[in-house]
Image (cartoon, rainbow, N blue to C red):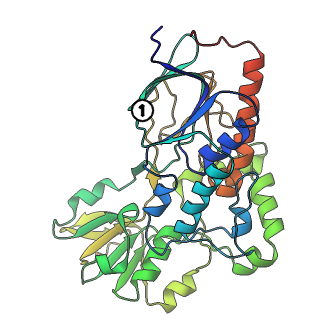
Amino acid sequence: MDQDIQQFDVVVLGAGQAGLAAGYHLSRTGLRFVILEQAPRIGDVWRARWDSLRLFTPAQRVGLPGLAFPAARNTCPSKDEFADYLEAYARQFSLPVRTGVQVASVGATETGFAVTTSDGVLQARNVIAAVGANALPRIPAAAAGLDAEILQLHSSQYRRPADIPDGDVLVVGAGISGAEIALELAATHRTFLSGRPTPHVPDPVLRWADPLYWRFIHFVLTTDNPLGRKVSANFHRHGAPLFRISVKDLDRAGVVRLPRFSAAAGGQPAFDDGTSRSVRTVIWATGHKPSLDWIEGLPVTDWGWPITRRGVVPELPGLYFVGMPFQYSLTSGLVGGVGRDAAYVVDGILERTKSGVPTPAK
């Protein structure tokens, strides 16, 4: 065995909220583990998002295991505040994070997995993929038919209104990200929003009924019961609910709402009602999709999501996921829900270790 190959019980891929939550639980097991993060700094994924972004859930629901978020109840942290919190969290619990490490592939071996990285090959009995679901922008194929003079941006590329050229703007996708971007742009540009807005969660629900609301989405809407399974079946096809803002807010700001984008007609965006609009900029708030082809032999759905049982991949023993949307409940993709999923996965790793899984040769 090549002595340069680094050996671990667990390799965690990603130092976002899911990876750090997994690290917290692993730090209490005595297992040898490391957390790999491709960004130069913990939290950089959040820092790179648009300037005015705030988390959609209140401070009391964005703490990770063992450390509450340091802000007043019912306030929504900024993306930079949350990025700094993640950095402080890793420091608080002395989590072994290696930043700036690119993962090229994960492949099964006789004793576990070989993780090939820019920092060398790591061998592990178990791998936790906490890489999130936002690897690749999802943009309709019809976007290719738009006029070359139209500036096209995905929501992940949008930063601030000052970067958007003069002229009309079309935001495609009326989930929370699309709605917030459209509302911000309406102050400086004539703005259109295409798509059916997702349901609005009224502010009083979050402010006064937060415990009941959280209990419902965290404990009731799970894959353990029929209602949760029904919600999860089409969950990936729809945007997140509207928090903090509503359709009325959009209307008051002058955002013009349009039907769903369906095609390009004469180089301009066209919609389900047969109309089209001439615009200078299109922002695609149409979501993301995972990119997991670097995990050899991973079974995925037609939409590219890993096929798991509550984060466990039966076809590849020792491979786990944390932080995927509706991995177990509606809160699995939220900061406040990853801790429970991480604990479940780490418990599974401990059981697997006790069952006598071979240790990599040294």
Query: For mark 1, what is the residue?
Result: 293
* Residue 175 visible in the displayed image: no
Say what secondary structure mark 1 lies in: loop
x, y percent for residue 124: 57, 22
Choose top left, top right, bottom left or bottom right for residue 121: top left
Give the answer, above or below, for where 183 lies relative to 350. below
**Horizontal and vertical percent position of residue 41:** 47, 52
Q: Please tell me whether residue 215 is drawn above or below residue 186 in the rendered image.
A: above
Which residue sits at x=37%, y=68%?
Answer: 158
Picture quadrant where residue 358 is located: top right
Task: Decide if residue 44 is on the left or right side of residue 308.
Answer: left
Q: Between 240 and 54, which is closer to the camera in this rendering?
A: 54
Which residue appears at 80% of the width and 53% of the height?
219
Q: Is residue 5 placed above or below 118 in the rendered structure?
A: above
* Residue type of the residue flagged with mark 1: Asp
Q: Residue 96 at what x, y percent from top left? A: 59, 39
Q: Is residue 113 shown to the viewer in this render?
A: yes
From the viewer's side, name the closer residue of 249 and 28. Answer: 28
Q: Which of 64 and 303 is in front in this view?
A: 64
State left or right for residue 312 relative to residue 110.
right
Q: Where is residue 335 in the image (x, y as percent from the top left)?
A: 65, 56
